[in-house]
Image (cartoon, rainbow, N blue to C red):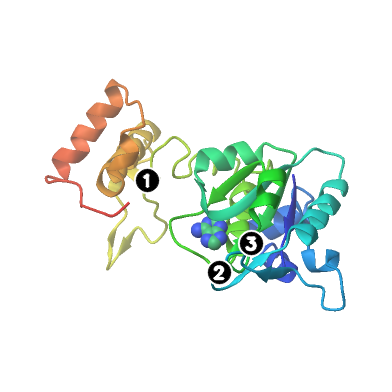
Amino acid sequence: MRVDVVTLFPGFVQQCTGFGVIGRAVERGLLDVEAWNPRDHAEGAYRRVDDTVCGGGPGMVMLIEPLRRALAAARQAAAEPARVIYLSPQGKRLTQDKVKELAGLPRVILLCGRYEGIDERLLEHEIDEELSIGDYVLSGGELAAAVLIDAVGRLQEGALGDSQSAEQDSFSDGLLDCPHYTRPVSHEFGDVPAVLVSGDHAAIDRWRRMQSLGRTWLKRPDLLENVALDEQDRRLLDEFKREHKGQPHEQDH
Ligand code: ADE
């Protein structure tokens, strides 16, 4: 998959692709991330990329033309058609379902804003989709772009060592992941649940499913509203609830 990022800080984006799973995906050619600086497409001695807000008010707004030219250069750099995504707190919230959809595309172009934002006319003409990584305001879209690149990059075929890892992720079936343990089996902080060292794989699968359902109920009960539980799931969740007498903790989400 190819990701082109239009940003005033190309170094930031390149740095984010140098480590861990994403670094390896880039090395193996599973993911190609290129950055495009609108300043390289700006005119005049000062290579201006922003101007004051029409109608008055604080801050600056990014100019249409340098962004338009940077986007055109990015589009022309590869043959595959690209979906152009603007990262902004006003976008639709990024979810794992959306990540999976984007990970299946050959190419996306990510547009990162700075300052007060981008001239609305550029957005109306050039953007296919607007995405947010959460209900808070960052000083620019670059961190959001890095989040998106990480999330789609790790889903590229061959990026994760164990092909099952992505299937077991939290959210992949609408539920949170079960807890994980490693050696030592006995520790002053507690023992690994006995079922996990029993060798009984059916019992282990059952326990993991129950934990996944139970944790979702405890930590993110809102997610359960969108998952169709079968008879077996309902029994497992009831069993978990009996073992954890009481109600889910109230959490903000
Ligand atoms: N740019 C600034 N804040 C953002 C957010 N929450 N998500 C995506 N892009 C942003």
Tag 2: Cα neighbours inside 10 Å, few (<14), some, or many (≥20)?
few
Tell me if the residue at label 2 has its CB under 8 Å from ligand 1. yes
Split into 4 quadrants, where in the image is the N terminus?
A: top right
Residue under label 2: 139
Q: Earlier in the sequence, mark 3 or mark 1?
A: 3
Tag 1: Cα neighbours inside 10 Å, few (<14), some, or many (≥20)?
some
Instruction: Name which quarter of the figure residue 23 lies in.
Output: bottom right
Q: Is residue 151 something one can see in this rendering?
A: yes
Under circle 2, the secondary element is: loop
Q: Earlier in the sequence, mark 3 or mark 2?
A: 3
Residue 24 at what x, y percent from top left?
Answer: 71, 57
Amino acid found under the numbered disc labelled 3: Gly
Residue under label 3: 113
Residue 102 at what x, y percent from top left?
Answer: 63, 40
Tell me if the residue at label 3 has its CB under 8 Å from ligand 1. yes
- Report the front residue among 18 and 183: 18
- Report the front residue among 62 and 109: 62
Under circle 1, the secondary element is: loop
Residue under label 1: 178
Residue at 36%, 40% (x, y): give it: 208
Label 2 to label 1, Cα distance in Å?
A: 34 Å
Residue 7 at what x, y percent from top left?
Answer: 71, 63
Residue at 26%, 54% (x, y): give it: 251
Residue 55 at what x, y percent from top left?
Answer: 58, 65
Under circle 3, the secondary element is: loop
Label 3 to label 2, Cα distance in Å?
A: 9 Å
Residue most extreme to the left: 245
Residue most extreme to the top: 231
- Report the front residue among 191 and 142: 142
Amino acid found under the numbered disc labelled 1: Cys
Mark closer to the observer (2, 1): 2
